[in-house]
Amino acid sequence: MSMQEDTAPRFVLLQMRTAPDAALHIDADVRAFCTGNGTALALHRAAASLDGSEAYVYLKSHATKVADGNGIAAAFQAQCDWASDVIASPLEPMLAIAGASTGERPRFHYVVETDPETGWLDEISRWYDTEHMPGLAAVPGCVRAMRFLNRGAGPLSLACYDLLHEDVLGSPPWLAVRATAWSGIARPHFTNTKRTMFRVVAEAP
């Protein structure tokens, strides 16, 4: 389903390098940061990479316009001494699908970021929307699947999956979705691709 209606929340992604003990502080510190911003921003999800080197914090707002990203990044880094090189990027929501395990609490967050090769954005978007994300969302262990366009630091396409277990990625149903003929056509036209498995450390109620 499209999420571009005026009533849809605006999202900001904070990407940062993190200190080794950051996971112990992210939940409380992100909530304190949002509280300090009044009703402007609210926590959606925060996740730390498995190696502890980086974190992604998704914030959402129902304001008609998201505040200056550079200001958000600077304020966040000033408040959280475990974070460095913070970058704030507006995310344009494109797709959200409830997964086979909807209603359960995800423990992992898998992110695939890529810049579609010139001329391939529309085809890759059709593949994501029509086949790939609905197929992966239907895999047992997937709680939800979302896709955004990163209108800041990029890469442009950000697809993310909330999972019950890290090994959902190696399950036969997941691998079957990745091995379709259309996948074989679309995936070679990914550039600047980054795939990261995170552990969920905070989320909205």
Image (spheres, rainbow, N blue to C red):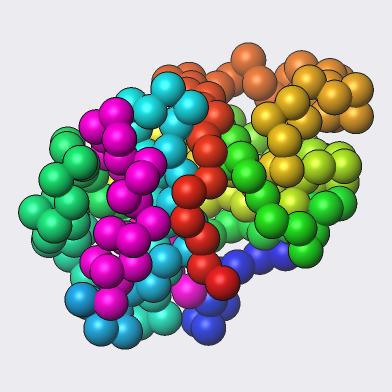
Q: In which quadrant is the C terminus drawn?
A: bottom right
Q: Position of residue 21 (x, y in %)?
A: 30, 35
Q: Position of residue 9 (x, y in %)?
A: 48, 74
- Of residue 145 and residue 64, the one placed in the foreground of this image is 145
Vertical side of 65 occupied by 171: above or below: above
Position of 102 with respect to 16 (left or right) is right
- Of residue 59 and residue 159, the one placed in the foreground of this image is 59
Q: Position of residue 32 (x, y in %)?
A: 27, 69
Q: In which quadrant is the N terminus drawn?
A: bottom right
Rendered residue at 66%/21% (across/down): 187
Vertical side of 205 occupied by 174: above or below: above
Rendered residue at 36%/45% (across/down): 24
Position of 148 with respect to 33 (left or right) is right
Rendered residue at 90%/29% (across/down): 173
Rendered residue at 65%/35% (across/down): 124
Vertical side of 171 occupied by 39: above or below: below
The answer to whether residue 27 shows anywhere in this view is yes
Is residue 11 a member of the stretch shown in magenta? yes
Question: Which image quadrant for residue 185?
Answer: top right
Magenta highlight range: 9-35
Is residue 46 a member of the stretch shown in magenta? no
The answer to whether residue 127 shows anywhere in this view is no
Vertical side of 20 occupied by 179: above or below: above
